[in-house]
Amino acid sequence: MKPILIGMIALATPVAAQTPDWRKAQTITVRMTDDGFVPRSIPLRQGAPYILRISNRSDKGHNLTQEAFFRQARVAPRDTDKVYGGKVVLASGEGLTVRFQAPVTRRGGTYQFSSTVLGDAGKDYKGVFVIR
């Protein structure tokens, strides 16, 4: 009976729950500039591992905020302290890396992100994660 139970547990374990191989992760580079995020559209594959490198090249602080995305993505345990309240915050000149596994959601799903810093809304400081 134990072999059958173990087999059933293995089959019931979702692929997304497996630890990603970060050596095979695709790197995404996002820059915060005085005019907004570059790039503004970031395509992701469902459940795929990514290394997100964010740098703030602006002369003031910004953040990248998307609570639902960071809640549904599997952020690597060593990087969870870099994402707080669904946002990544960077002062001018700072940079950081966040490893995550893209959310397993419907293809074509989108997660609009923005900077919630006062003054950024008027600059159209927005972007989107697109699940493919």
Image (cartoon, grey):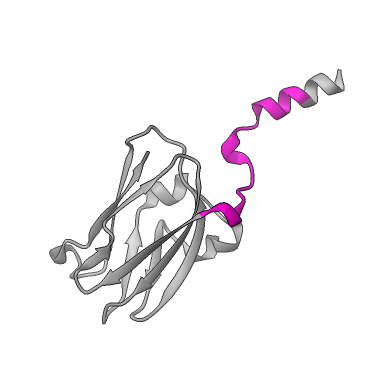
- Which residue, as the protein is rendered here, is positioned at the far left? 122
Residue 78 shown left or right of residue 10 in the figure: left
Residues 118 and 99: in front is 99
Report the span colored magenta: 7-25
By secondary structure, the bulk of the magenta-drawn segment is best described as helix
Which percent across, then down, holds residue 68? Answer: 39, 46
Where, quadrant-wise, is the N terminus in this rendering? top right
Given residues 98 and 84, the one toward you in this image is 98
Q: How many marks?
A: 0
Residue 76: x, y in percent? Answer: 57, 56
Please report the residue visible at 64 percent of the width from the left and 47 percent of the height from the top: 19
Q: In terms of image quadrants, where is residue 115? A: bottom left
* Relative horizontal placement of residue 10, taking residue 131 as reference (left or right): right
Residue 79's place in the image compared with 21, above or below, is below
Residue 15 inside the magenta-drawn segment: yes
User: Could you tell whether 105 is left or right of 48 in the image?
Assistant: left
What residue sits 13% from the left and 65% below the top? 122
Q: Which quadrant of the rendered structure holds the C terminus?
A: top left
Whether residue 11 appears in magenta in the rendering, the answer is yes
Residue drawn at x 65%, y 26% is: 12
Residue 59 pos. (x, y %): 26, 82
